[in-house]
Image (tube, helix red, strand yellow):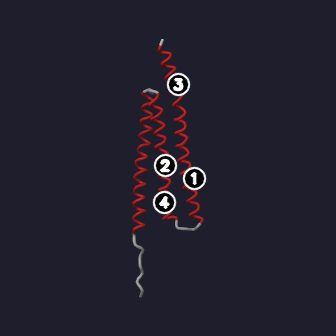
Amino acid sequence: MTLPIDLLLESGVQELIGWPVHAIEAASALIIFAGAVCAFVRFVSTGLRRRSLIGEFSKIRLRLGRFLVLGLEFQLAGDVLRTAVAPPSFTEIGQLAAIAAIRTVLNFFLTREIAEERAEIDQDLKKPEPRFAAP
């Protein structure tokens, strides 16, 4: 007789965890959207001021990359939370593993690119300005 009670408790926990999972996934989407909007606005404003986009482009990409990394982390957190509550089937485990692997690889390369961009920007800032000798 305890089987129906266990099933009710398990479905109740799954239902209860469903709300935070949806909230985390929504937060992820909002983070990525906000990052894209900020990057677009900065790109357009830089272009309208007729400033050189070459130097600013790296800074814009760096900021957008940070938003993407954070959004991917939130998505992965939602996936982990979802599977921690309900034991999925082997097919669902395989799909989750593939999704988690793809997100982790994307996150790794984004983080590495952000670090490289940051180092490049810091190096450019440390370069002394060229001085012209008077004739």
The residue that label 3 is drawn on is 12
In the rendered structure, the answer to whether residue 120 lies left or right of residue 48 reads left
Displayed quadrant of residue 132: bottom left
For the residue pair 116 and 86, the one nearer the viewer reads as 86
Up the image or down, 9 lies above or below 28; here it is above
Up the image or down, 108 lies above or below 93; here it is below
The residue that label 2 is drawn on is 68
Closer to the N terminus: mark 2 or mark 1? 1
Q: Nearer the viewer, mark 3 or mark 1?
A: 3
Separation (CA) of disc 2 from disc 4: 14 Å
Instruction: State the mark number for residue 59.
Output: 4
Amino acid type of the residue tagged 1 in the rendering: Val
Q: Position of residue 103 (x, y in %)?
A: 44, 42
The residue that label 1 is drawn on is 37
Q: Position of residue 105 (x, y in %)?
A: 41, 45
Contact, CB < 8 Å: mark 2 with mark 4?
Answer: no
Closer to the N terminus: mark 3 or mark 2? 3
Closer to the N terminus: mark 3 or mark 4? 3
Contact, CB < 8 Å: mark 3 with mark 4?
Answer: no
Local packing at callout 4 (Cα closer than 10 Å; few below 14, some 14-19, many 20+) is some
Up the image or down, 132 lies above or below 78; here it is below
Label 3, secondary structure: give it: helix
Amino acid type of the residue tagged 3 in the rendering: Gly
Label 1, secondary structure: give it: helix
User: Residue at 58% across / 62% down in the picture?
Assistant: 45
In the rendered structure, the answer to whether residue 110 lies left or right of residue 23 reads left
